[in-house]
Image (cartoon, rainbow, N blue to C red):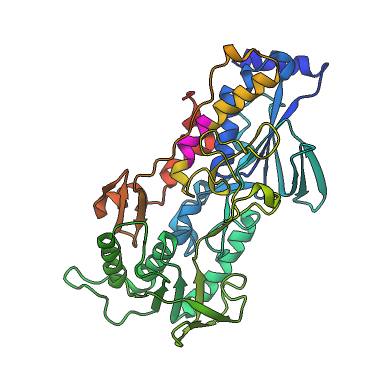
């Protein structure tokens, strides 16, 4: 395989420039797609169609975002060299010139002229012309504590600010009854308050008053009501009180939590009550990172309108695709990205070969992606408990801990980031 690579790259130094496969987004979808293309697609293209994979990401480092609810408490929670990894280093295994990483943020997509404008990390603008484009920009959390908002340095700075304020906090409010809100409240509860004894259902006199607010009639709406009730009991055991059917109508100051992570806040609820918080964390979902994509290519919720079977963006020009949380092809969930990657890359390969003039009869049909809609969601509730289901089957607390709760999926990222997970074409 490497012999083919070296011969193709050498020939291209004297022939036509490499065509660009541009991938926007340096996280699960983008990194996985880049590895798969470099291993199984680009080396098999005709010599006169040689391509370079260009990965453009706002952060120079990838990180295990699901680990944020625990990682925000202290660097001692996880080995930092595994939690954060340099993206450029991950791709040194491939032949020189086959890959490049660019740190920058996509600002405007021109699908007609097949360019994407990017603001580089140094502030300078750059236009990238692409032969094929994959949008894998993911989504941003409302709180800068719970995911990357730019480079990894900004996330670390937010954590440092929060950690400085944490020892003096006597009240913490987390808003959002989904997995991230539950996990964050539980991690803080167990860290600050400990856990109730074996024969106690509720922690008496917690050191820090922690409140979880949800607008729904229960937390963890995706899971069965009985599972949500179990999670609420686990929360009570670490001193977390749950308020349901409550909407936050106002926050003072308005930038508390979303910008100033250490600011004290007063939250007004729709029933007229108020909550005072020494620390406030908004964990109310995510916003797709698609502001650079024209509205005509977006769905109502802001994701890129993607063919759910082929992962192409049918309303755009040829060879433009989307995957992950920025795509409408499936509900936002990391575990749904992994079966999508081989489908996406197979269809990219097919489209590249057709563009190179290869006869369609020798290529085969599109590969089809089908979202697994079975109930799958794992939610650790503190350091030793958890609730959830996998492929429609309810899991015992011990299994949720063993699979996710031990280290929030960090055990999986080594093979993913390095590309070992994609060693075989599937």
Q: Which residue is drawn at 51% across and 82% down?
A: 267
Name which quarter of the figure residue 315 lies in.
top right
| Residue 277 place in picture, x, y as percent | 48, 81
Q: Where is residue 310 in the image (x, y as percent from the top left)?
A: 54, 33
Q: Closer to the camera, 251 or 422?
A: 251
Q: Nearer the viewer, residue 319 or 162?
A: 319
- In the drawing, does residue 222 fall left or right of residue 124? left
- Asked if residue 92 lies in the magenta stretch, the reply is no
Q: Which region is colored magenta?
A: 337-343
Which residue is at a point 62% across and 75% down the rendered structure image? 255
- Check the image and report above or below for 266 versus 13: below
The answer to which quarter of the image holds residue 113 is top right
Image coordinates for residue 420, horizontal then vertical, percent: 49, 30
**Residue 415 makes an appearance in the image:** no
Query: Would residue 41 be found to the left or right of residue 98 on screen?
Result: left
- Residue at (49% x, 63% y) in the render: 72
Residue at horizontal 66%, vertical 19%? 354
Which residue is the extreme one toward the left? 199
Height in image: 178 above or below 351? below
Would you say residue 340 sits in the magenta stretch? yes
Task: Give the x, y percent position of residue 111.
Answer: 74, 40
Count of marks, rendered view = 0
Type of secondary structure dominating the magenta stretch:
helix
Would you identify the image quadrant in which residue 206 lies?
A: bottom left
Inspect this view and state whether residue 379 appears.
yes
Viewport quadrant of the N terminus: top right
Give the side of residue 28 with respect to residue 375, left or right: right
Placement of 71 over or under 49, stated as above or below? below
């Amino acid at each position: 395989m490497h012999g083919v690579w070296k011969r193709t790259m050498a020939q291209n130094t004297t022939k036509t420039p490499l065509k660009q496969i541009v991938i926007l987004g340096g996280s699960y979808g983008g990194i996985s797609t880049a590895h798969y293309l470099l291993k199984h697609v680009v080396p098999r293209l005709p010599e006169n169609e040689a391509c370079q994979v260009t990965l453009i990401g706002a952060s120079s480092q990838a990180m295990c975002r699901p680990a944020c609810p625990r990682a925000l408490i202290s660097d001692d929670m996880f080995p930092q060299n595994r939690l954060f990894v340099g993206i450029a280093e991950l791709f040194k295994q491939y032949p020189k010139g086959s890959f490049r990483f660019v740190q920058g943020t996509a600002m405007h997509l021109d699908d007609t002229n097949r360019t994407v404008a990017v603001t580089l990390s140094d502030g300078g603008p750059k236009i990238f012309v692409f032969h094929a484009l994959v949008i894998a920009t993911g989504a941003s959390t409302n709180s800068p504590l719970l995911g990357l908002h730019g480079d990894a340095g900004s996330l670390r700075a937010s954590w440092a600010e929060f950690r400085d304020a944490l020892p003096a906090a006597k009240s913490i409010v987390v808003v959002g009854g989904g997995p991230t809100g539950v996990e964050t409240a539980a991690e803080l509860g167990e860290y600050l308050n400990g856990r109730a004894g074996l024969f106690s259902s509720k922690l008496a006199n917690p050191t820090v008053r922690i409140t979880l607010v949800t607008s729904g009639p229960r937390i963890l709406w995706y899971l069965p009501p009985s599972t949500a009730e179990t999670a609420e009991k686990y929360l009570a055991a670490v001193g977390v009180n749950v308020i349901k059917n409550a909407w936050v109508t106002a926050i003072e100051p308005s930038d508390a939590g979303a910008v100033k992570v250490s600011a004290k806040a007063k939250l007004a609820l729709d029933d007229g009550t108020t909550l005072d918080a020494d620390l406030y964390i908004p964990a109310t979902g995510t916003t797709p990172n698609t502001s650079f994509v024209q509205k005509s290519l977006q769905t109502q919720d802001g994701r890129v309108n993607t063919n759910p079977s082929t992962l192409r963006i049918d309303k755009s020009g040829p060879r433009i695709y989307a995957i992950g949380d920025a795509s409408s092809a499936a509900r936002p969930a990391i575990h749904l990205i992994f079966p999508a990657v081989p489908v996406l890359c197979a269809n990219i390969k097919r489209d590249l070969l057709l563009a190179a003039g290869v006869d369609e009869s020798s290529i085969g049909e599109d590969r089809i992606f089908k979202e697994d809609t079975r109930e799958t969601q794992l939610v650790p509730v503190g350091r030793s408990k958890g609730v959830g289901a996998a492929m429609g089957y309810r899991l015992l607390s011990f299994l949720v801990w063993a699979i996710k709760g031990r280290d929030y999926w960090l055990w999986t990222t080594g093979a993913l980031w390095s590309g070992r997970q994609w060693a075989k074409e599937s």
